[in-house]
Image (cartoon, grey):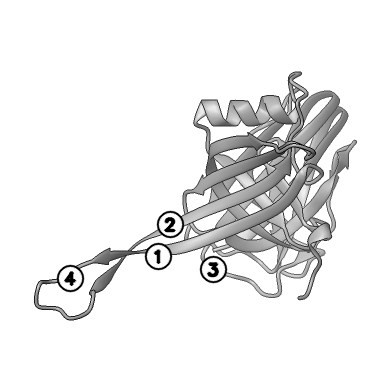
Amino acid sequence: MVTSSHLTRILVGKLSISCIATSVSPSTNRMMIERTALCDADKVFIPGQFDHSLGVGAMFDNTTSAGSYWAELTDNYASDTLLPITVGPAGIAAGSPAWLAEAYQMSYSPSQGVGDGVDLGLDFATTGVALFGQSITDLAAVTSTSNSAAVDGGAASSNGGIAHLHVTGVSSGTTLDVDIEHSVDGSTSWATLGSFTQVTTGTASERITVASGTTVRRYLRAAFTVVGTSYTCSVAFARS
């Protein structure tokens, strides 16, 4: 699928940073260990561990109030918290392709030159390769107990997967429960595949794992149980 970068959306923990981001670069490298002996005419290497990272270029927002970009990114860096990160290269509408990664924020680096805007570089170290999956819901307000539309995964799979929940805004909320459900045909016999921790009155994010060896049926949806007014959230899933 050919797409344009202006469609890309990025969710980092409790933040949607799409509207301050200017670039995103997921990367996987294989470390090579040199094992060259004195008698070797050429360098000799053996494969080592994989190194996964994510770089984000962004514009600096110096609002420091609670919940602002700067406050949240500073907290991410200081708290040593693993963050679920969802990147939709063509947006995050339901069914859109998405990378799902789990990462520590390693750095945030404001920079500026004379006559330039202030930029912000963000670097993340991911704990494994970013799995390629789908958005189950767009980032939108959920105002009542409901189910999202069914998302077609193309076929059933048999090795579990991972799911991300990003709650970026709460308006007079009391509790939000979110389950991932799956179905053979997309219309009947929906069953719970995984459940996120209940969200209360604040923004939140979570990554859950569906155990290896678990069958994931072809169709997926999110089931929302809402007590309160409105939660702005997005859900994504990647099959292992």
Give the x, y percent position of residue 227. Answer: 83, 28
Q: Are marks 2 and 1 in contact (CB under 8 Å)?
A: yes
Name the residue nearer the viewer: 152 or 98. 98
Q: Residues within 10 Å of mark 3 (few under 14, many from 20)?
A: some
Give the x, y percent position of residue 23. Answer: 71, 53
> Which residue is identified by label 4?
36
Q: Nearer the viewer, mark 4 or mark 1?
A: 4
The residue at the point 67 percent across, 51 percent down is 86
> Which residue is identified by label 3?
158
Q: Is residue 55 above or below residue 168?
A: below
The CA distance from mark 3 to mark 2 is: 27 Å
Q: Residues within 10 Å of mark 1 (few under 14, many from 20)?
A: few
Q: Nearer the viewer, mark 3 or mark 1?
A: 1
Q: Secondary structure at mark 4?
A: loop
Type of the residue with mark 1: Arg
Q: Are marks 3 and 2 in contact (CB under 8 Å)?
A: no
> Which residue is identified by label 2?
51
Q: Nearer the viewer, mark 2 or mark 4?
A: 4
The CA distance from mark 2 to mark 1 is: 6 Å
